[in-house]
Image (spheres, helix red, strand yellow):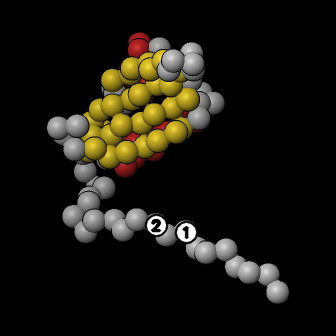
């Protein structure tokens, strides 16, 4: 008889976390986006990060009005064939 793999647990979502209004996001993608593309990604700040090994990733950071705006940015990144490594809702002070 096969043993079942243990189920992965998902972190609990805080009760006060809201997604229906403006929020600051940090998105990391594999590869590079020119900083001039800021308007194409919802007006977010675009910063290219290079590692010691020479690989590159791009950090997008900024305020998006709602989940629809976030979805639009993610769809743009997908259309550019960029691997999305991380999406994080952040506090204003981060």
Q: Tell me if mark 1 has few (under 14), some (14-19) or many (20+) residues whose alpha carbon lies within 10 angstroms of its own.
A: few
Q: Is residue 49 left or right of residue 91?
A: right
Query: In the figure, residue 60 lies in which quadrant?
Result: top left
32 or 5: nearer the viewer: 5
Q: Tell me if mark 2 has few (under 14), some (14-19) or many (20+) residues whose alpha carbon lies within 10 angstroms of its own.
A: few
* Quarter of the image that includes the C terminus: top left
Q: Which mark, residue 8?
A: 1
Q: Is residue 32 left or right of residue 17?
A: right
Q: CA distance from mark 2 to mark 1?
A: 7 Å
Q: Secondary structure at mark 2?
A: loop
Residue at (27, 36) in percent of width and height = 63
Image height check: is 89 above or below 52?
A: below
* Quarter of the image that includes the N terminus: bottom right
- Specify whether residue 37 is in view: no
Residue at (55, 29) in percent of width and height = 30
User: Residue 10 in the image: x percent, y percent?
Assistant: 46, 66
Cβ–Cβ under 8 Å for marks 2 and 1: yes
Q: Secondary structure at mark 1?
A: loop
User: Residue 91 in the image: x percent, y percent?
Assistant: 22, 44
Residue at (36, 68) in percent of width and height = 12
Q: Is residue 3 left or right of residue 31?
A: right
- Which residue is the site of mark 2? 10
User: Residue 31 in the image: x percent, y percent?
Assistant: 56, 23
- Specify whether residue 43 is in view: yes
Image height check: is 25 above or below 31?
A: below
List the single residue furthest toward the right.
1
Image height check: is 85 above or below 41?
A: below
Image height check: is 18 above or below 75?
A: below
């Amino acid at each position: 008889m096969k043993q079942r793999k243990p189920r992965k647990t998902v972190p609990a979502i805080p009760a006060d976390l809201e997604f229906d209004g403006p929020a600051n996001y940090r998105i990391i993608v594999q590869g590079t986006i020119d900083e001039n593309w800021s308007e194409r990604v919802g007006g977010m700040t675009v910063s290219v990060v290079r590692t010691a090994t020479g690989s590159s990733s791009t950090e997008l950071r900024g305020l998006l009005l709602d989940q629809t705006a976030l979805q639009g940015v993610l769809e743009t990144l997908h259309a550019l064939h960029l691997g999305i490594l991380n999406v994080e809702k952040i506090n204003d002070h981060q």
